[in-house]
Amino acid sequence: MYVQHLSLTDFRTYSQVEVPLEAGVTVFVGPNGVGKTNIVEAIGYLASLSSHRVSSDKPLIAFNAERALVRGRLVRGTQTTSVEVEINADRSNRARINRANPVRASDAAGILRTVLFAPEDLALVKGDPSNRRRFLDDLMVTLLPHRAGISADYERVLKQRNALLKSARASGKFTASHEATLDVWDQHLAEAGARLLHARLVVLSQLKPHLERAYHQLTDGSKVAVATYRSSLSGADDDGGGASEDDTLSSLSVEELTEKFIAVLLVHRKKELDRGISLVGPHRDDVDLVLGGTVAKGYASHGETWSLALALRLGSYYLLIEDDHTPGATPVLILDDVFAELDASRRKKLAAIVGGAEQVLVTAAVSDDIPESLVGHQFQVVPGGLVSSGT
Ligand SMILES: Nc1ncnc2c1ncn2[C@@H]1O[C@H](COP(=O)(O)OP(=O)(O)OP(=O)(O)O)[C@@H](O)[C@H]1O
Ligand SMILES: [Mg+2]
C-alpha cells in the first residue's frame, strides 16, 4: 500500500501543509529541527494512532492550537481510502473514514500499515524491558487487531489488584475478607495475564525466523540474532525476574497458563502483601535479545545495537508481509534518520532491502547520507512547509 496524499493542520510545526506522495522512494531533506520527523511521525500516527516519540498526544498539537488534524489518502491495490484523525487537547480523539460520520479514533487504526525505523529504536536493545514489551504488544495489535483490548484489560485488572494489595498492607493486617477478595482478583489477573502472555509468545515465535533473517541480511552474517521471551512465571525468582525458557510456556494453552499463573501467585502471596504490589505477570516480563550467544544489552557494540534494532523492525516488516500477502497489503516503510548511523556497507545493504518496498519514506539532514541506489522523489523541508526538488 502507499500514502498518496498527506495533509496536516496544526500538527507540531505545521499550521497547514499538503504533501503529495507517490509509490516508491520519497526523501525528506533539511536541517536539524526543521520538521522532517514531524511529517513521518504523522504518517506513523495515522497507522497506529500513537507516536513513536511520545506516549501522550499533547506534544503533537501545535503550540497555541486546540486540536491537530492528520489526513491521509491511502491506496491499497485498486482501493483508495481516506482517513482523517482529529487529535484533541481536551476531549477524546475522533476519526473519519471516507468522510463518513466521526467514529472513535481507535476504529481507524490498522487501515494503514507502516513499519517505522527511528533512532528511538535503540531503546529496544539498550532500554528497559517496557520498550520490548511495547514493541511486542504493538506488533500483536497490528497482526491481530481483534486482540487490541487484551493488553488494556490486563493493565486494568493489574491496577485494581495493586490497589487492593496496597490497601491490605496499609491496614496492617490481612483479614479473611482481604483474602477472599484477593482470590477473586488473582483469578481475574491470571485469566487476563494468560491471554496476553499467550498472544505475546505466539507473536514472538512468528517473529523469530524473520528477525534472524533480517539481522543476517544487514550484517556480514557472522552472528545470529535470537529473541527469547523471559517470563516472570517460569522459575519465578525473588524479583519476579524469571528465567528465559519460553519453549516450555509456548507449548501451554491459555487455560494451562492461567492455572500456572494462579499457582505462582499463591507462592508469591506473602511477598506481594508485604510489598503491596503485584510481583509476577506479563508486566514484569522481558525479551532477551542475544547476538552470537551473548546478550546484546550491555555487550553489543554501537553498530551491532543499531543493526539489531533495525532487524527487529525489518523482521516485523517481513512478518507483516507473510501475514497478509495480498497485492497492495505491503506496509509502508519509514526510515527516520537511519542512514547517518550506519557504515557504508550496512547503508548499502539496508538500501537494497528496502528499495523493493511499495513505498519508502526517508528523512535525512544531509542527502549525501542516503545511498545512491535509493533514488526517488525529494522534498526539501523548510520551516513550516516543503519544497519539491524533483527526483
Ligand atoms: N507541538 C509543537 N508545536 C510547535 N512546534 C513543535 C511542536 N513539537 C515540536 N515542535 C518543534 O519541531 C521541531 C522538531 O521537528 P523535527 O523533529 O521534525 O525535526 P527534524 O527535521 O526531524 O530534525 P533532526 O534532523 O534534528 O531530526 C523542534 O524545533 C520543536 O520545537
Ligand atoms: Mg528528525
Image: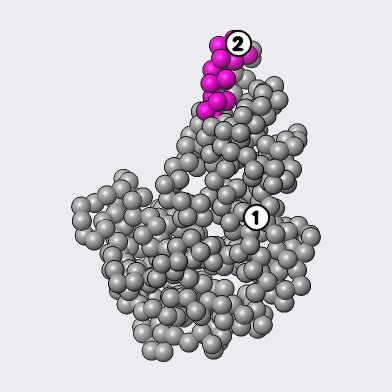
Secondary-structure class at tag 1: loop
Crowd around label 1: few <14 · some 14–19 · many ≥20 (10 Å) = some
Task: State the residue in front, 69 or 201.
Answer: 201
Give the amino acid at mark 1.
Gly
Quarter of the image for residue 221 reads: bottom right
Tell me the residue that label 2 is attached to. 175
The residue identified by callout 1 is: 127
Note whether residue 374 is visible: yes
Point out residue 297 in the picture as x, y percentages from the top left corner.
72, 57
Quarter containing the N terminus: bottom left
Position of 318 relative to 158 (above/below)? below
**24 lies left or right of 129:** left
With 313 as the anchor, is 12 left or right in this view? left
Please report contact status of discs 1 and 2: CB closer than 8 Å, yes or no. Answer: no
Q: Give the range drawn in magenta.
A: 174-189
The answer to whether residue 32 is seen in the rendering is no
- Position of 127 with respect to 143 (left or right) is right
What percent of the width, then of the height, locates residue 306?
65, 68
SS of the residue at dot 2?
loop
Q: Which amino acid does label 2 sit on?
A: Thr
Task: Name the residue nearer the viewer: 326 or 284.
Answer: 326
Q: Which sits earlier in the primary sequence, circle 1 or circle 2?
A: 1
Q: Which residue is drawn at 70% across and 63% down?
A: 225
* Above or below 82: residue 354: below
Instruction: State the residue lying farthest toward the top.
Output: 176
Q: Residue 153: where, in percent of width, then height?
A: 47, 37
- Asked if the beta carbon under badge 1 is closer than 8 A to the nearest atom of ligand 2, the reply is no
